[in-house]
Amino acid sequence: MSLRLQCNGYIIRLAAWAGDGFKEGVSLTVYDELARWEKYAFGCNELLFNPIRTWLWKGPFTPLFRRFIFSNIRFTSKITIISYIGTYYAIGAAWIMTTANYFLMGWYNGYLDKYYLDSWQVWFSIIIVFNGLGNLSLAIMRYRSGERTLGYAVWENFKWTLMLALFLGGLSLHVSQALLAHMFEIDMSWGSTSKEAEFSNFFIEVPKVLKKFRVSMLLSLLSIIGVIILATADFVPHDWRITDFVAILPMVTVAGSHLLLPLALNPALMTFSW
């Protein structure tokens, strides 16, 4: 709707609620939050690309996206919109690029072009900028606005860092699934989100987790086992071994996040209610 209105010459402004009372869009479970990201990814791909089957006669890009590109919308707005949509493709590609980086840095480190930026450097930069300076800047802003004391604002921001890192690190496989589902016209459906907290316990939740996340958890376990084997197994030839920290850490981080996402962020499991 926003793209169509802007293409027709309307000026769009974001209307938002202030304060902590408006709770629309708040997910009560990890399933709902994950489904929301999958819906957004599916929708973004739907805005940009036609299904691959139709590329021969329709072309790769949708009429709406072509109209958007050649419209009179401000260039800066176009960059902002495309950058936002591109974040879903970046997240979806993370597990693929990290796997490729693991083998490239493990087997060909020193032979790669200097323009190649490995996952360790990207990961370290993100930790410093977003997890570190981003949280600190937000705390200072809240302190200067009189909303919080400086110490409490810093604590409030940093206490969620691990959970946010775990969630965003475990998104990649699920987002790429949604993107590819639209590309190849595979049906994906989502139920309605939970409007209130529902009773659950350990024995109810475990079967739900295994059913919904069995593929991602299996791939994560296989990745971690593969990393251990290539680093320590005696039967692996010396030239095939991957023991470099800069190759292993990003791979283990992505695999571990996908494995822990449905477990560590699931209150029904973490409260150990039986």
Image (cartoon, helix red, strand yellow):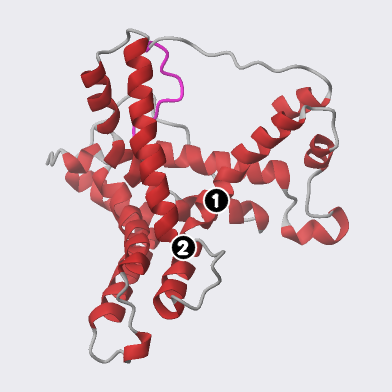
Q: Quadrant of the C terminus?
A: top left
Crowding at mark 1 (Cα within 10 Å: few <14, some 14-19, many 20+): some
Prevalent SS, magenta region: loop
Give the left or right position of residue 232, taking residue 192 as reference.
Answer: left
- Amino acid type shown at disc 2: Asp
Name the residue located 35 percent from the left edge and 38 percent from the top edge: 131
Let me know if residue 190 appears in the view: no
Residue at the limit of the structure toward the right, as seen here: 57
Vertical order, 213 against 247 (above or below): above
Residue at the limit of the structure toward the top, as seen here: 146
Query: Which residue was labeled with disc 2?
Result: 118
Judging from the image, what secondary structure is the residue with disc 1 in?
helix
- Amino acid type shown at disc 1: Ala
State the image quarter where residue 69 is shown: top right
Give the left or right position of residue 265, taking residue 33 as reference.
Answer: left
Vertical order, 96 against 18 (above or below): below
**Of callouts 2 and 1, which one flags the residue occurring earlier in the amino acid sequence?**
1
